Image: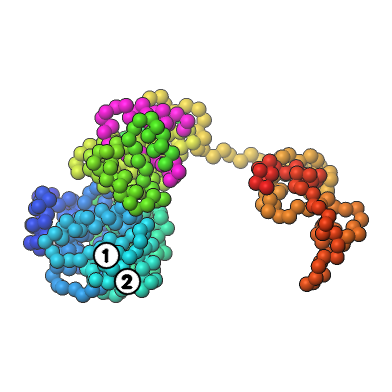
Amino acid sequence: MNTDKTFSDLGLAEPILHALAARNHTVPTPIQAQAIPELLQGRDLLGIAQTGTGKTGAFALPILHRLSQARGGKQPRALILAPTRELAIQIGEECRAYAANLKLRQAVIFGGVKQGAQVKALVRGLDIVIATPGRLLDLMNQKHVDLRSVEVLVLDEADRMLDMGFVRDVRKIVAALPHKRQSLLFSATMPQEITRLSSDLLREPLRVEVTPQATTVERIDQRVYHVATAQKRALLNNLLADPAMSRVIVFARTKHGANRIAGQLHDSGHAAAAIHGNKSQNARQQALQQFRTGEVRVLVATDIAARGIDIDGVSHVVNYELPKDAESYVHRIGRTARAGKVGVALSFCDSAERGELRDIEKLTRQTLTVVGEAPTGPDRSAKEPRQAREPRRNKEPRRGRNRGPRSDEARSEENRGNENRPAQAARPTAKPAHGKNRRGKSQRPAGGKPRGGDDVPRRAPEQRGDFAVPAFLLADA
């Protein structure tokens, strides 16, 4: 790997070099230095690099160079797929800056907003489409998008696309592309599913791996606090009293959890905002802008939103809850220590999350520094061994009245799902005169009225004598 190369040595067009110089970008990152020359030759590429290593420039610059060599029609010639709206917008901003001196048309297509403006851009004609799979597939189904002229396909953050369930959408989109094309797949991690996907999409690809798989950024100081879930809120408030935590991203597992944490921080006097998939696009962009400008000190996010947060100067990342997937930890802490700076990643670990902590340390091949007291109490994340069942001496009948008393839990389990069924009367000892069968249901002739007995009221569920109805069913009645 030659670290002495400059962008001028890579063979990029002069207008692109001028745009790079205007942004004070003169030396390519390692993945850019390795990938750009090969991509300019038209090779397929499988790129593996940690977040924040310049992956966007690694594929955007060769695409812009290729498209600038010939004039295209109205149909898109390059398609870049990203898993989240934020990441798609970020890629669009980078491409627009790099193409400042080129007459190339581009648009960012994503869900959560009305499609009118996106459809108009497609009708006017585009050279580059940056899109999320879901919205692009919707527009394809509506015949608004024609991808038969695509020359270059890019899948960015492919592992996150798998996590979010976009595999089927991606394959449908790829099926609409020309067979003869250049394909690029970039990912921060390389699970087995990505390996299979790459073998289906790429033809004899060049594999560029800048850092070992799933290795975290070395400039990040990683620490862990062993604290009970009930004490995490107080711990976070105490930590935020340190002015060194100037720009903080707090990660939660769920959307509800993100909203709850942001609300609690706001009640404690901290400027905080939440960002997740249920937020409208305008609300998400506003929260990011407030965080970028410093109006909001703490941004609470979910893993899905993590890939789209590209903001310099993030001093700390807090894992309020450890992710279920250890690879998501790598993406979380990658929000800090960007652009050559250092950062701090703090993780809160309850006794039920020690299994996730072990997975993280195994994946990253390092032990997180414990702050405060070492973990105490039982490891609730460990699975208890199953106890052998004792043989039954006197085998009791499975049905009948000799089974003994049933617990409330057993009754509740037996009758789960019966809350919407009509109430049944107690089994009669003899056939009633008003025409009901053994199960207490009225016998109606086909197409006619009941033979009688409709004025007989049914017994309320709480009046049944054969079992006790759980209280939560009565509350829903």
- What span is colored magenta in the figure? 229-258
- Residue at image point 82% right, 65% down: 450
Label ID, residue 145: 2
Q: Residue furthest top?
A: 373
In the image, what residue type sits under mark 2? Val
Residue located at (27% from left, 38% from top): 295
Residue 396: give x, y in percent of width and height.
Answer: 81, 45
Number of residues whose C-alpha sits closer than 10 Å to that of mark 2, classed few (under 14), some (14–19) or many (20 or more):
some
Q: Is residue 23 left or right of residue 379?
A: left
- Residue 86's spot in the image, x, y percent? 31, 52
Residue, x 79% and y 52% (percent of image)? 458
Question: Which of the two discs, 1 and 2, labels the residue nearer the N terminus?
Answer: 1
Q: SS class of the residue under badge 2?
A: loop
Point 30% across, 64% down: residue? 117
Q: Which residue is mark 1?
A: 129
Q: Closest to the observer: 238 or 332?
A: 238
Amino acid carrying mark 1 in the image: Val
Q: Is residue 390 above or below residue 208?
A: above
Q: Are marks 1 and 2 in contact (CB under 8 Å)?
A: yes
Indicate left or right for 388 with 205 as reference: right
Residue 215 on image: x %, y %? 30, 44
Q: Is residue 27 above or below residue 383?
A: below
